[in-house]
Image (cartoon, rainbow, N blue to C red):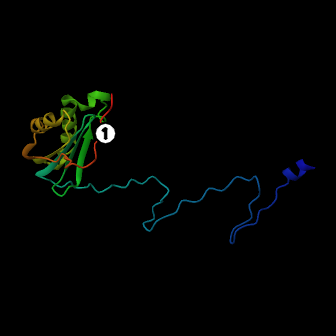
Amino acid sequence: MAEEQKNKTAATPAPQGKAPVKAGAPAAKPAASQDAAGKKSGSAAKVKKAVKEVKKLLRGQAHIQSTYNNTIVTLTDLSGNVLGWASAGHLGFKGAKKATPYAASLVVARVAEKVSPYGMREVDVYLKGIGSGREAAVRALQSNGLQVMSIKDMTPIPHNGCRSKKPRRV
């Protein structure tokens, strides 16, 4: 008896304005709609995107954060909007190799390549941290076609801030 009920095609309630649909019947394909120009919207019509014009910047800022573990270089415009960045870890260096001067020079080369469409020629350098990639990154900026106009050290210095650890008793 259960098989007889499965074989019977029961009509489902139809939405307003449509014919009832039988269970198990293949669904009808929806017709492609047409827009105002008479073209079918279902077809693969290519739409050209407007090419975004890149602003030409002559001067910007280079923020170099060099720690014992990594070197991060960010190039921004004069108001601080990021144009491109890279780090030694982002380039695939692992472990202690991330903090080397060689890694810092490759990081600067990658960032200079990223911001080349902006036409930047002069940078103000802001250094932060005490890693070994500091000087190498500044030299690499000059060797990659960016003229260094000023260098400012922004390394945070504590003015007797946190209380130091108590001395060990040995």
Query: Which residue type does callout 1 highlight?
Result: Lys
Residue 160, x across and y down, in percent: 21, 48
Answer left or right for 105 relative to 7: left
Nearest to the observer: residue 112 or residue 65: 65
Give the side of residue 20 with respect to residue 165, left or right: right
- The image quadrant of residue 109 is top left
The quadrant in which the C terminus is found is top left
45 on left or right of 65: right
Image quadrant of residue 9?
A: bottom right
Image position, residue 138 (x, y; %): 12, 38
> Considering depth in this image, is 99 or 156 the residue closer to the camera?
156
Query: How many residues crowd mark 1 within 10 Å: few (<14), some (14–19), many (20+)?
Result: few
Name the residue: 24% across, 51% down. Answer: 82
Q: In this view, does 131 lie above or below 121?
A: above
Residue at 68% x, 71% y: name it.
17
Picture residue at 19% right of the left edge, 38% below the top: 130
- Image quarter of residue 102: top left
- Residue 93: image location, x then y, percent: 30, 30
User: In the image as oriented, which residue stretches furthest toward the bottom?
Assistant: 16
Mark 1: secondary structure: loop
The residue wearing badge 1 is: 166
